Image: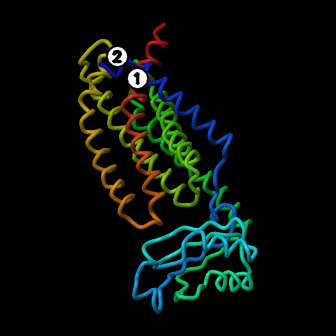
Amino acid sequence: MFIVTYRKIFFTISIIAIAISFYAMATKGFNAGIDFKGGSIIEVSYLPVGASAQVGDKQRPDIETLTKALNETGFEGSRIQMAGENDVIVKTRALSEEDRQKLTSTIAFSGFTMEEKKFSSIGPTIGAELRTKAWYAIALVILGIVLFIAYAFRHVSEPIPSWKYGMITTATLLHDIIVPAGVFVWLGKEVDSLFVIALLAIMGLSVHDTIVVFDRIRENLKLKISNDFATTVGTSLRQTFTRSINTSVTTMLVLGTLYFFGPTSTKDFSLILWLGIAVGTYSSVFIASPLLVLMEKRQAR
């Protein structure tokens, strides 16, 4: 009953988090990756030769050296990311074959043997199309989840009709993707296709937690464990609380391990998933069910 009784506190925390997230999005904006704005990405691997190989103190050029070389040859604004012990990833504007050859020669330094591992380029038109399809995918997933909730709870009419379960689920889903996205904007992280995949995964995990709690509420309503709806919701939360927390914490431990010890290419992906699961668990337990109680009380007036 603690969660239901002090629901206003939890609502306030979420409102503040959403407001800060929207503020970040409005002031800083999304740092779109080449998937959505177009551009080129090249990954190279360096191996020291001669004396450097013997000393082993410098496995590849540092970021300052690479940035200076790129700026001097017309590749200003390129983003450089270190990967593993020897690899370097450079993200820049869309390149022609001539520009690609120029870039490759620019980042080839004496004292190192350089091997190109990957190169890909996406035009701005394709990037805009991918961005539009990403929004469509998120909207369709939310719509599908709402329809599923409304159907699954179609026999629940008292004291809250089934469509309100779907409406609350939609509100919590938006909460669960807005807050992690806001954190990503604050951190200046790049938004790419992996970011969208992470958001879709977050929605699936979040709605699963919400359904578990809602389903227990439905069962307890059938069992008529109390005539007071708030008491029924509080009892249902208590019965599912440990399961929800344990499941989420276990998943977050795995994602934390992937973030700290996994490859550079998956760090942002594991971070957004970690944030999403934390926020999703919070909303499923502290927001969704208390919103049912709030609606029931307003409906009874």
Which residue is under mark 2? Answer: 229
- The structure residue drawn at horizontal position 36% and vertical position 55%, both measured from the top left corner, is 255
Horizontal arrangement in the rendering, residue 132 relative to residue 281 (left or right): right
Which residue extends farthest bottom?
50
- The structure residue drawn at horizontal position 55% and vertical position 40%, both measured from the top left corner, is 178
Q: Quadrant of the N terminus?
A: top left
2 vs 1, front mark:
1
The answer to whether marks 2 and 1 mark residues whose Cβ atoms lie closer than 8 Å is no
Q: Residues within 10 Å of mark 1 (few under 14, many from 20)?
A: many
Judging from the image, the colouring scheme is rainbow
Report helix, strand or loop for mark 2. helix
> 3 above or below 30?
above
Horizontal arrangement in the rendering, residue 181 relative to residue 155 (left or right): right
Horizontal arrangement in the rendering, residue 117 relative to residue 246 (left or right): right
Which residue is under mark 1? Answer: 290
Which residue extends farthest top?
301
Residue type, numbered disc 2: Phe
Between 96 and 67, the one nearer to me in the picture: 67
| Alpha carbons under labels 2 and 1: distance apart | 11 Å
Between 276 and 138, the one nearer to me in the picture: 276
Q: Residues within 10 Å of mark 2 (few under 14, many from 20)?
A: many
- The structure residue drawn at horizontal position 67% and vertical position 72%, both measured from the top left corner, is 68
Q: Quadrant of residue 90?
A: bottom right
Residue type, numbered disc 1: Pro
